[in-house]
Amino acid sequence: MIKVIKPGMLTTIQDLGRTGYQKFGVVQSGAMDPFAHRIANLLVGNPENEAAIEITVTGPVLEFQTDALIAICGGRFHAYLNGKPIGLWRPVRVENGSELRIKQAETGCRAYLAVAGGFSVPTVLKSKSTYLRARIGGFQGRTLKAGDEIQVGMPGELSKQLQSLFEDGSLQASWSVSKTIMPDYGTFPTIRVIKGRHAELFTDESIQEFFRKPYRISRDSDRMGYRLEGPGLEFKRAQEMLSESVCFGTVQVPSGGQPIVLLADRQTTGGYSKIAQIAAVDLPLMAQLKLGDKVRFQEISLEEAQALYIDREKQIRLLKKSIFYQEKRRDTHAKH
Amino acid sequence: MLDYQLFPEGDCAVLIEAGKEISLENHRKVQTIVSLLENHFPKWMIEYIPAYTTVTVLYDPFKIYKQTSENPYIYVSRYLTQLLEKESAAPLRKPRVIDIPVCYGGEFGPDLEYVARVNRLTPEEVIHIHASGDYTVYMIGFAPGFPYIGGMPEEIAAPRKKTPRLRIPERSVGIAGKQTGIYPIETPGGWQIIGRTPLKLFLPEKDSPSLLNAGDKIRFQPVSAEEYKELEMMPS
């Protein structure tokens, strides 16, 4: 069991979201940075879709009332186990009675704490993700509060194998995930997009501005979407749109002309013009931006975006293999 | 033959557009596409999102990559083109008719008087007109279980509030322009609220979590405050 001592700014339980219910208007939710979420799970031997704790801007203080294998992935947060700094993007061993303190992030604003075995919270519509507006999923449909006690699930076979990394008494793995396979996180990233199906409704000048000038993340940005501030976008002529689907990373433009990027807790359908769609591989870059950070958009083709997608998936599978290779190498070493 | 166009929606989705305006005919086309997708659900398909005149198919490009060397978007487009040729193969179900009891006015419908005033009607007339409409649920979207309903008589149309309310209680029935709708969960909103239904529209414990489905016909039935309370106590 893990006890919450201090909850942090906005700490929720998330898996990769609710799938198959958008036709009923049910919001997908799930990790804002699915890459960091998946890697955190892989590092502790969990299935990629297992629930993890999503940390936002300021992390929680947690007391472990169990031995555990954990990993923290995401923005550059400072994390301390019983006062000693621990690294991100690697497996870490936690002993019963330990205190984990996750402070603020130097860059980025979200991190995922995965625990071997995952979290035993009820599934709602086949997902453990918290959707705050409907008060469903996660821990009682809400953000974590001081005093909450979260049950940890039974670690699987892979998690048990990873325990051997720590037979020498070390606290954390000596290796971590290579930067080369991570998204290029930063406070002013260039985010690749595919033109949206309503792009031709905008004036040529507006389309040029959209791809040339930076946009800033403004107030009223949350898990549902980010409001951007920058060059106003103009339509060739006013047009009534019919509501239709929106996706994770859709960039839509209300009549005021300032774009909105839709994220994990987005509504399923919307009635604004879609100027662009963020390439799935660059969604983690967007989700890590915080108030005041800037972003620039770059157009790529659908073919490029899908090639990048396939490449990223291959790398994640390679990483998964190499995690267990690390463990095996140590294992063989110990036997000799 | 179904008349439609395909558009990429980023790298993981394709949108099928079967028309440009809200009509029962386009609604039926959408229903036909949905029933074809339900009956042919390949492994790479994640889910689909129907709307007024469109259906968006979400897919996993990596799963397609593992089974073919073809570009994923082109592969999905060809699959859908072949599927939609089967149009006549899937007969449409007869629509369900669902009665929605509504307690109009009072604390449940603080804007009933306003809707009556702007239309030079009495509150009773507004209730009568609202409850006698022939309504169709065109789509479910925006929020869990939220129905986009067509068919409200124009005599009771009313503009949205200039300043949206910060909290509209769940199950409120409202009017915005020529539309009527029901809020499944508490949200902020600018609709004119005329009543409340005791029925839950979002049922997260059920595998079919929306009380209403696209294609349903609905009828609003005025009920008294006492009847409302009794109905609210009944299990859904």
Image (tube, helix red, strand yellow):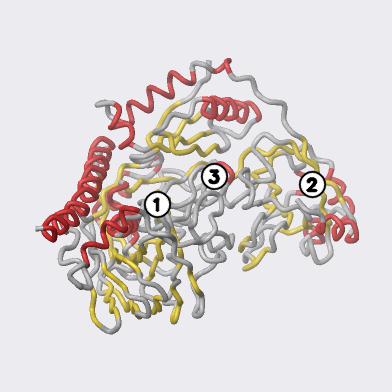
Q: Amino acid at mark 1?
A: Asn
B150 relative position to A111: left or right: right
Q: Are marks 2 and 3 on the same chain?
A: no
Q: Between residues A253 and A319, which one lies in front from this camera angle?
A: A319
Measuring 19% from the left and 72% from the top, which residue is drawn there? A170
- Residue at coordinates 53% horizontally, 55% vertically from top-left? A123
Residue A301 vs B170, above or below: the answer is above
Q: Label 2 is found on which chain of the structure? A: B
Residue placed at 45% from the left, 63% from the top? A13
Whether tag 3 and tag 1 are in contact, CB under 8 A, the answer is: no
Element type where label 2 sits in the image: strand
Q: Is residue B26 above or below residue B89?
A: below
Whole-angstrom CA distance, mark 2 to mark 1, is 38 Å
Q: CA distance from mark 3 to mark 1?
A: 17 Å
Residue A323 placement (x, y as % from top left): 21, 54
Above or below for A288 versus A59: above
Task: Give the residue displayed 56% in from the left and 66% down from the top.
Answer: A140
Please identify the quarter of the rendering in which residue B111 is found: bottom right
Q: Which residue is mark 1?
A: A49
Q: Same chain for marks 3 and 1?
A: yes
Q: Name the image quarter holding residue A96.
A: bottom left
Label 1, residues with CA under 10 Å away: few <14, some 14-19, many ≥20: many
**Circle 2/circle 1 CB separation < 8 Å:** no
